[in-house]
Image (cartoon, rainbow, N blue to C red):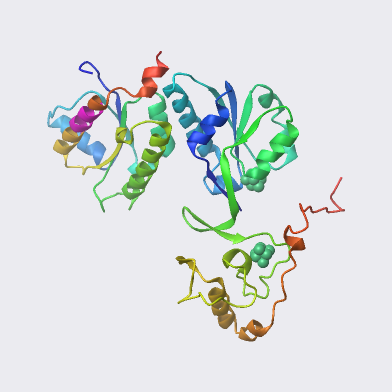
């Protein structure tokens, strides 16, 4: 798996995680280009269907990044997102995909460092898991 | 509304195994409201089935479609050409919808994607609870608006059993004793004397005890 470059989709909330990504950029903090960021108004807006579709289209990993506990701009979008992630993780297992391929993380707007660190850790984790079996067979 | 839940994916994968082109059919009414078989759930299931297939090295053509009501012949009729192009139908409606499709399209295999549960109401976001068993002779007018048939585990007609403790049913602490609820409500309404009236043994002929039931409205029936 040495050469395997995973495709990772990161749904980032506009108010916290996306701002943190911005900050990581302006601080010139390196993070893997494997992570494709999709900005969303709130992590609570990320629907189960968006996540499942990302996997169906070939993502090796997906994470949803919301604000820290209690800091959601829309009150509790991040709490709703966490519940939804747990639900989709179970569904992935039913489908036959490792639930570790999906994760919820919380990052505040000022945490540029944490954003870069999370991106690297998740990329490494997915690299170890190997390519998604869906992508592998879809390209056959 | 009629409530339902998706069947385990494994069972559905098994149903559609022999087929190449599937029509995955949602319903816009009850099962949309209880988040089991509406447009969104059709999308989720289509994705899940496709991925499971891909994982096993094959693929399947899934056409997604959701109609207003699968229990109405007018809407089901409109599916003719779509069903023609499919090897099998996987219906995400309640059991009534699945049967309507099966009756109309006799030579097409039809499978249920859901387990139909009960007639219920929404307690809060994401929680549905049983409220009626369609007994055909509603008692709510004398039981304070609380149904002893669907909400009492023993379907008692005249007060609680000995297992009723601090307002809870003996089957579980999570279940309210229906007769406690009835008593409380009658008290609030100032109708406690009603409680003393003996409700006679229930005649179950109206509740399915004499076979499949049917309603015929002479003024409407064609
Ligand atoms: S088919 Fe079932 S779920 Fe759909 S509207 Fe009719 S009763 Fe409700
Ligand atoms: S008494 Fe019968 S009709 Fe009335 S709510 Fe209960 S089960 Fe339904």
Q: Residue B51 placed where, x, y %? A: 44, 26
x 29%, y 23%: residue:
A7
Q: Main secondary structure of the magenta part?
A: helix
Q: Residue B9 placed where, x, y %? A: 49, 36
In the image, ligand 2 is in what quadrant?
bottom right
| In the foreground, B95 or A9 | B95
For the image, the number of numbered tags is: 0
**Residue range highlighted in magenta:** A119-126
Direction from residue A40 to residue B36 in the image, left or right: right
x 47%, y 76%: residue:
B165
Residue A123 included in the magenta stretch of the image: yes
Residue A2 included in the magenta stretch of the image: no
Task: Say whether residue B62 is visible.
Answer: yes
The image shows residue B41, relative to residue B129, as above or below, that is above
Direction from residue B189 to residue A12 in the image, left or right: left
Q: Residue A97 placed where, x, y %? A: 37, 31
Query: Which quarter of the figure is the C terminus of chain B placed in?
Result: top right
Direction from residue A108 to residue B149 in the image, left or right: right
x 67%, y 26%: residue:
B83
x 79%, y 54%: residue:
B215
């Amino acid at each position: 798996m040495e050469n395997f470059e995973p495709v990772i989709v990161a749904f980032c909330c506009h108010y916290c995680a996306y701002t943190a990504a911005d900050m990581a950029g302006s601080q010139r903090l390196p993070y893997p280009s494997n992570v494709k960021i999709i900005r969303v108004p709130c992590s609570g807006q990320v629907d189960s269907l968006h996540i499942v579709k990302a996997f169906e289209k070939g993502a090796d990993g997906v994470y949803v990044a919301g604000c820290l506990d209690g800091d959601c701009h829309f009150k509790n979008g991040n709490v709703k997102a966490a519940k939804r992630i747990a639900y989709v993780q179970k569904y992935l297992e039913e489908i036959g995909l490792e639930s570790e391929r999906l994760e919820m993380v919380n990052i505040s707007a000022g945490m540029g460092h944490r954003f870069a660190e999370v991106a690297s850790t998740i990329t490494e984790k997915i690299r170890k898991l190997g390519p998604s079996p869906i992508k592998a067979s879809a390209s056959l | 509304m009629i409530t339902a839940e998706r069947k385990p994916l494994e069972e559905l994968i098994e149903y559609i195994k022999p087929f190449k082109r599937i029509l995955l059919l949602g319903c816009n009414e009850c099962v949309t409201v209880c988040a089991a078989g509406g447009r969104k759930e059709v999308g989720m299931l289509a994705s899940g089935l496709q991925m499971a297939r891909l994982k096993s090295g094959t693929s399947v053509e899934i056409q997604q479609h959701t109609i207003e009501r699968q229990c109405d012949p007018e809407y089901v009729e409109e599916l003719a050409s779509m069903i023609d192009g499919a090897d099998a139908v996987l219906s995400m409606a309640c059991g009534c919808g699945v049967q309507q499709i099966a009756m109309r399209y006799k030579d097409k295999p039809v499978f249920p994607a859901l387990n139909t549960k009960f007639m219920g109401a929404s307690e809060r976001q994401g929680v549905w609870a049983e409220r009626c068993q369609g007994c055909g002779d509603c008692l709510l007018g004398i039981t304070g608006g609380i149904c002893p048939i669907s909400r009492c585990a023993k379907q008692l007609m005249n007060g609680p059993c000995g297992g009723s403790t601090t307002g809870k049913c003996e089957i579980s602490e999570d279940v309210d004793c229906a007769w406690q609820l009835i008593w409380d409500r009658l008290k609030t309404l100032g109708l406690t004397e009603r409680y003393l009236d003996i409700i006679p043994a229930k005649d179950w002929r109206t509740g399915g005890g004499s076979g499949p039931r049917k309603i015929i409205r002479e003024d409407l029936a064609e």
